[in-house]
Amino acid sequence: MHDIRNFCIIAHIDHGKSTLADRLLEFTKTVSGKKRNQLLDDMDLERERGITIKSHAVQMEYKYKNKVYILNLIDTPGHVDFSYEVSRSIEACEGALLVVDCTKSIQAQTISNLSLALKNHLVIIPILNKIDLLDFTPENVMKEIMELVGCKIDDIISVSAKNGIGINNVLNQIITRIPPPTGDPKAPLQAIIFDSLYNPFRGIEALFRIKNGYIRKGQKLQFMSTGKVYCAYEIGTLKLQRVSKNQINTGDVGYVVSGIKNTSEVKVGDTITDAHKPAEKAIQKFKEFKPMVFASIYPVNSDQYEELRSSIEKLQLNDAAFSFSSESSPALGFGFHCGFLGFLHMEIVKDRLEREYNISVILTIPNVSYRIYKNNNQEIFINNPSDFPEIEKLKKIEEPYVLVSIITNDNYIGNVMSLCIEKRGIMIGDHNYMTSKRIKIMFEMPLSEIIFDFYDKLKTISNGYASFDYNFIGYRNSDLKKITVLINYEKIEPLSLLVHKTKALFLAKKICHELSLLIPKHQFSIPIQVSVSGRIIARETIKALRKNVTDKCYGGDISRKRKLLEKQKKGKKKMRQIGKVEIPPSAFITFLKIKN
């Protein structure tokens, strides 16, 4: 136990966290042979987007002063939408490497993740990365780090993860500055599950960190939240390839295979103990993160519903912040109403379903959770606009607000403030100059205004120099209107959404126009109507496909042509009454972009 060091890496996107992890694996000779970049990012999505989506654990061995130490790195994502992954990694560690790009300095999300680490009393080792680049001023960045962490300038390690400069110093500092884990090897077994994944051949693999006691191969284990007992058929450590062991001791990190097939029987945050000599109480569970963004997922092919259910259950096992429940829609059939931490999280889940499980899905318009008070003072939460009650029955509506922290250069402060005000933001406090050029500003904003395109617009107006982070602060009164789409006089609930009254008219007209272009022509005319709070305020009509019935009338009385046209008109009217409008899946997918 005294030779073990458990640590994570905290960094903003593109500050070199994955590259530093690659060098640590290389310098500890954990990886050999031909190497690729982003070794711990095993998803194609992670390598394509250049971000870490899932936390990854890997064990390294490093010799320091003629003694071999075990280093357990639990990698963390950097985007605000994956803060739940970060919190779980932090709670399984005793130390953290704070990586800062010397050309970009400290970003908002770095501060957010660092505060999580400090709350958990982790030892922070600040690292200044990319020192091989010419366009940087280390003095200003170091000053920011010293003020943020409360360290001395000698505590900051300067490295170039790309070129391997200073990596040995980082490894030495991990051993000397991060304390070993604490625990009682003789106490009853207590191990907390910090992650899990599904293997089609071996069942569910639970990743754990042992607080007290030890685990042996073949031992009978009890999962304390369910009370069920399983046999540890295989245990081992988490190197780039699984390494089977006969015993894992206090303070170490590993995996266990128990032949579990049912995904509901393994929960992140659960405590594993010995079935014969169980611990008196479970380890304190991880803080639960409530979903902030909600959307529905339907299979493009309705025959794949059960396959989609199985895939979502397996994905949830590997992503504990993702939640779902069954629902049905007259237009789209059977599907699932899902909760996400943010818009990026939602996009990643959709892409993973399509790539990893080969299921084409339709994603409805994302919404946030609203709190509604009825006239009888009954309080309910609405995650789906289709459940929104009639306006006459409502006393008041509240929407979630978040505290947004933005760090940017002073050249872009005007553009950033204009964007925040446009998104109904309220400025809190004065400008906080972190350096002579970098400013931190804070706004209180509705969550619904930032989940779509706020991040992209912020990066555009600041030429990529601004960063932001947000935290939920509560619900506040809001004047919201429900937009309902009617196609051929039939309500299409998956296209419903809640918007602020100031944007309702503009959005209704835009939705009506865009849908008239997205839906193909039919044999009958299709009216498209958009209502706001029950009142129709916009309409477009898709004209019918018509055959020229008078084509063969070369002469004669005009009444003959009129008779043919009237007959066609009656047929079209009857067809519209009994006909069904086919809405292509591409229309729902394209519709997502309209709200932006």
Image (cartoon, helix red, strand yellow):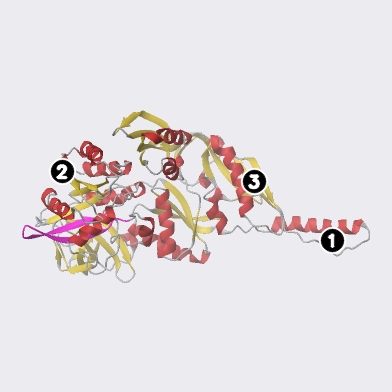
Residue 320 percent coordinates (x, y)? 33, 54
Between 378 and 388, the one nearer to me in the picture? 388
- Tell me the quarter of the picture where residue 185 sits: bottom left
Foreground pick, 216 / 226:
216
Residue 498 lies, in percent from the top left, at 52, 42
Instruction: Please state if 505 lies on the left or on the right of 101 as rendered.
Output: right
Q: Which residue is mark 1?
A: 550
Q: Quadrant of the N terminus?
A: bottom left
Residue 457 seen in render: yes
Estimate how packed mark 1 is, as few (under 14), some (14 to 19) or many (20 or more) residues with alpha carbons within 10 Å: few
- The mark closer to the camera, 3 or 2, is 2
Element under label 2?
A: helix
Q: What main secondary structure does the magenta stretch of the protein show?
A: strand
Above-or-below relation of 314 to 413: below
Q: Mark 2 = which residue?
A: 155
Identify which amino acid the numbered label 1 is placed on: Thr
Q: Secondary structure at mark 1?
A: loop
**Residue 249 part of the magenta-drawn span:** no
Residue at the extreme left of the image, as rendered? 66
How busy is the neighbourhood of tag 3: few (under 14 within 10 Å), some, or many (20 plus)?
many
Find disc 3 in the rendering and name its residue.
529
Q: Position of residue 572 (x, y in %)?
A: 75, 57
- In the image, 462: left or right of 567? left
Q: Label 3, secondary structure: give it.
A: strand
Q: Which of the two discs, 2 and 1, sits closer to the camera?
A: 2
Above or below, 490 relative to 221:
above
Residue bounds of the magenta highlight: 54-75
Q: CA distance from mark 3 to mark 2?
A: 64 Å
**Measured Cα–Cα span from mark 1 to mark 3:** 32 Å
Question: First in sequence: mark 3 or mark 2?
Answer: 2
Label 2 amino acid? Asp
Magenta run includes residue 74: yes
